[in-house]
């Protein structure tokens, strides 16, 4: 090789090395910038509650960004799990399997950062507060940050041809943060703790104590006369609980919209982002009263338009209470309406309120009814399981019968895989569960009109019925006409006529009928539509 060729070779090699280094430096700066933004957001937001509205002036656009959080958050979770699984296989193979995870890690970091940003916007707009939401947020932030560091450790380790434990430690740490944050988020969204439920099931944790005794105690309380009710505890608090605390309380959902908490005296005095909610003794200056009188289309009107509005007697009681409060921040002793010399109109207004005792009794009754319904559904499902197990002894029904949903007791029968093998004899075997079927798809089967006439009327709860591509005519519609809950009907490629369609005129719930390639015409459809105005027809080409 000549000296000139040697020089050019070394120059190209040097340029490649410098270009690679420049790329790594750029990626490093980018990752650190993203991590910095993610970590800084909560701190800056705490100092400036208007951060989101300043960065994203259009509230509707901000809401769209926040609504993307449930969609985006699953991307980094899946990517991180894929990377972690691949690396574990690589470690266990002692170098024989070398997964290429650089790109996946980069995408994981990017999507994790976007999940944090959309999540923070969602938290701010929906007013999610409290320790659980804070822990969920920081779990996500730490996951994104540590995953970013793991990515950089892998890149720089590969460049320097060093394969120390730093990358593996950071990757494992990121999975720990992910598990922690995702667990809390899932619990807050779905309302259950699957890990706790499993530990209870395995008897590694004791079951939670029943609330029945407390509920029974509440039911046994004597309901106070209106004049004997405490002004704050028995009058004001029930109003706030029913109309305000869903969004402005540290309740189950941990929300406080607008930075306002209304479940305590201190919270009312502190107020929110706009003004002091409560100014003792001054009705006009108390923002909690002002917003009640604003037009419903005003952005500040409370409760929001889609929520239950304040009744006139509730507003009257709140105004009276605010007006009699002594000036100052100290919460006054709670006294009865009689002790406060409340006028008769206030006592009459208090009489219209649902008392805490009545609320507790109603809640207990609701819980009891819910439990009874769950017990009945469980018993019904156990009975269904017996019938299903009997049917599934026949290979024909092993995959064609299923529940409509995980918690439902309704069944769906789909004969897509059976086609011509399903005949009259097989169809009649569904009789023991006929009233539990809400969807039946028997298109392209060899079931006769006679079997349809004898078996379909037993399926009183059918909502969807597919009879397409069957050798049937209008006679079969006499059976269909006996299905009062039917909403969807497919008669594609059958011999059904206009005259037959009129047999369905009493099916008031029917919404859609598919009739392409049948003997029926649009004119026949219009005739039936006069009997069922909401009905839609789909004819296609005949």
Image (cartoon, rainbow, N blue to C red):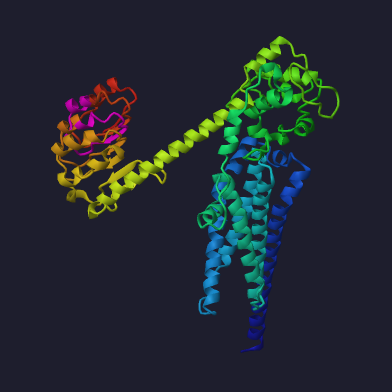
Q: Which residue extends farthest top?
A: 344
* Residue drawn at (31%, 43%) of the image: 412
* Residue drawn at (63%, 74%) of the image: 158
Write the start and end of the magenta stretch as one range. Answer: 479-503
Please say if 97 is above or below 348. below
Specify the quadrant of the image occupied by residue 372.
top left
Instruction: Tell me: 38 left or right of 105.
Output: right
* Residue drawn at (67%, 72%) of the image: 166
Coordinates of residue 68 in the picture (x, y in percent)? 57, 45
Coordinates of residue 99 in the picture (x, y in percent)? 53, 72
Using the image as rendered, state which of residue 489 and residue 180 is in the foreground.
Answer: 180
Residue 132 seen in this snapshot? yes
Instruction: Tell me: 35 left or right of 276.
Output: left
Using the image as rendered, state which of residue 297 and residue 191 is in the foreground.
Answer: 191
Please say if 279 is above or below 24. above
Using the image as rendered, state which of residue 49 and residue 357 is in the foreground.
Answer: 357
Please say if 161 is above or below 500. below
Please say if 254 is above or below 349. below
Using the image as rendered, state which of residue 264 and residue 496 is in the foreground.
Answer: 264
Residue 299 seen in this snapshot? no
* Residue drawn at (72%, 54%) of the image: 39
Q: Quadrant of the N terminus?
A: bottom right
Q: Quadrant of the C terminus?
A: top left
């Amino acid at each position: 090789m000549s000296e000139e060729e040697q020089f050019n070779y070394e120059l190209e090699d040097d340029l490649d090395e410098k270009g690679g280094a420049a790329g790594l430096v750029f990626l490093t700066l980018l990752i650190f910038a993203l991590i910095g933004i993610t970590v800084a957001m909560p701190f800056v937001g705490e100092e400036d509650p208007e951060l989101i509205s300043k960065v994203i002036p259009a509230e509707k656009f901000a809401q769209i960004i926040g609504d993307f959080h449930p969609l985006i958050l699953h991307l980094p979770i899946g990517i991180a799990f894929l990377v972690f699984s691949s690396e574990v296989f690589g470690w266990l193979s002692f170098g024989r399997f070398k997964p290429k995870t650089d790109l996946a890690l980069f995408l994981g970091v990017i999507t994790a950062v976007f999940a944090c940003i959309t999540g923070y916007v969602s938290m701010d707009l929906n007013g999610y507060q409290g320790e659980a939401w804070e822990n969920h947020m920081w779990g996500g932030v730490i996951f994104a940050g540590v995953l970013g560091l793991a990515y950089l450790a892998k890149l720089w380790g590969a460049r320097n041809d060093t394969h120390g434990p730093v990358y593996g430690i950071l990757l494992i740490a990121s999975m720990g943060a992910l598990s922690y944050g995702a667990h809390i988020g899932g619990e807050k969204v779905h309302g259950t703790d699957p890990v706790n439920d499993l530990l209870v099931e395995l008897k590694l944790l004791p079951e939670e104590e029943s609330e029945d005794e407390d509920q029974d105690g509440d039911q046994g309380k004597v309901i106070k006369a209106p004049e004997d009710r405490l002004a704050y505890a028995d009058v004001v608090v029930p109003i706030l609980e029913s109309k305000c605390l869903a969004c402005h309380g540290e309740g189950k959902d941990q929300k406080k919209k607008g930075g306002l908490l209304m479940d305590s005296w201190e919270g009312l005095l502190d107020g929110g982002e706009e003004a002091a909610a409560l100014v003792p003794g001054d009705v006009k200056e108390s923002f909690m009263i002002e917003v009640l009188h604003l037009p419903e289309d005003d952005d500040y009107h409370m409760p929001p338009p889609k929520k239950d509005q304040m009744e006139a007697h509730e507003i009257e009681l709140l105004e009276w209470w605010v007006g009699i409060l002594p000036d100052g921040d100290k919460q006054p002793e709670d006294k009865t309406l009689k002790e406060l010399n409340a006028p008769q109109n206030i006592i009459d207004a208090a009489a219209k309120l649902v008392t805490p005792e009545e609320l507790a009794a109603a809640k207990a009754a609701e819980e009891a009814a819910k439990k009874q319904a769950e017990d009945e559904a469980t018993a019904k499902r156990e009975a269904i399981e017996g019938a299903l197990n009997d049917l599934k002894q026949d290979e024909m029904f092993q995959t064609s019968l299923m529940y409509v949903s995980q918690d439902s007791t309704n069944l769906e029968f789909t004969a897509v895989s059976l086609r011509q093998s399903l005949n009259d004899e097989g169809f009649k075997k569904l009789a023991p569960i006929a009233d539990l079927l809400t969807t039946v798809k028997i298109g392209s089967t060899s079931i006769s009109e006679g079997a349809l006439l004898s078996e379909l009327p037993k399926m009183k709860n059918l909502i969807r019925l597919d009879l397409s591509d069957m050798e049937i005519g209008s006679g079969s519609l006499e059976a269909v006409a006996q299905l009062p809950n039917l909403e969807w009907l497919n008669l594609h490629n059958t011999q059904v006529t206009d005259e037959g369609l009129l047999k369905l005129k009493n099916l008031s719930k029917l919404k859609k009928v598919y009739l392409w390639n049948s003997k029926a015409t649009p004119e026949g459809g219009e005739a039936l539509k006069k009997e069922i105005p909401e009905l839609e027809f789909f004819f296609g080409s005949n």
